[in-house]
Image: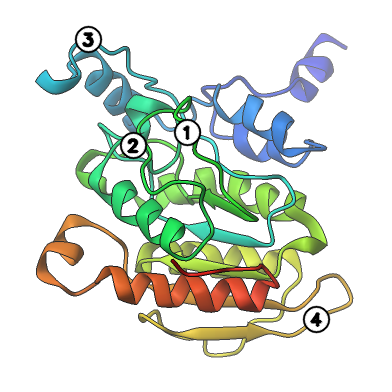
Amino acid sequence: MEETEAAQSPPDSGETGYPAYFAARCDGLAELDAHLVRCRACPRLVGWREEVGAHPRAAFRDQEYWARPVPGFGPADAALAVVGLAPAAHGGNRTGRMFTGDASGDFLFAALHEAGLASQPTATHPGDGLELYGVRVTAPVHCAPPGNTPTPAERHTCRPWLAAEFGLLGPGLRAVVVLGAFGWQALLPVLGDAGWELPRPRPAFGHGVHLALPATGRRQPLHVLGSYHPSQRNTFTGRLTSEMLVEVLTRAAALAGLRSEPR
């Protein structure tokens, strides 16, 4: 009897089965986020996020780092999702809010504001007053990875959180902007498992790519658009300009039925 009960007990936060077990049982995004921030399923990521938090950059020496998984940010009834890669070591891993406190986030939120989808162009910390209009920002990996490069195994372990998040956003979700090839490769299988029919072969990532997924018996139509990631490598070289990102966000907002008024 004791062995049977032990086998059925929920996995510990440090076990690889923790995300799949709890993500599938959440009834809302608040519950999902509460379980997510306790996750310790990937030892390499746990070690790195805590190591960074214990040795902050000089500019942030007076701040206590979040150093935990970073949940998605934005309203629970969002019609548009923006999917990145993972939190930055001294950005989201420091502030506890997705894309907040680093150069990539500065670029993204300035573009969201320009597109009329954010209340202000800056994001510095969770209490800064930033509000997103019909948009939720998230990532396929919720812990800061060394070198900004999660392993395939880490992406797979973290995947249930993203799948549950998309399921909980519900029928109001109409469009997704995916920032970068990593997010594209991570998201498409999630959408397929959730009930959307993906074309074969699956389309390759590219800036401006637009994938229109038709309604199925389980899901409403969904538009998936690609954009280069607002990494400093892309923005400093001009591969991604503010105008390019604003154009993709504005188009996605229109497809999602949001009232976007570029500034």
User: Which dot marks residue 62?
Assistant: 3
User: Which dot marks residue 124?
Assistant: none
Q: Amino acid at mark 1?
A: Val
Residue under numbered circle 4: 215
- Out of 248 and 224, give the one closest to the viewer: 248
Q: Earlier in the sequence, mark 3 or mark 2?
A: 3
Task: Verify CB contact (< 8 Å) between mark 3 and mark 2.
Answer: no
- Out of 85 and 134, give the one closest to the viewer: 134
Q: Amino acid at mark 3?
A: Asp
Q: Earlier in the sequence, mark 3 or mark 4?
A: 3
Task: Verify CB contact (< 8 Å) between mark 3 and mark 1.
Answer: no
Q: Nearer the viewer, mark 3 or mark 2?
A: 3
**In which quadrant is the N terminus drawn?**
top right
Alpha-carbon neighbours of circle 4 within 10 Å: few (<14), some, or many (≥20)? Answer: few
Q: CA distance from mark 3 to mark 4?
A: 50 Å
- Out of 3 and 137, give the one closest to the viewer: 137
Q: Is residue 150 visible?
A: no
Residue under numbered circle 1: 70
Q: CA distance from mark 3 to mark 2?
A: 20 Å
**Corner quadrant of residue 22:** top right
In the picture shown, does residue 160 fall above or below 179? above
**144 to the left or right of 51:** right
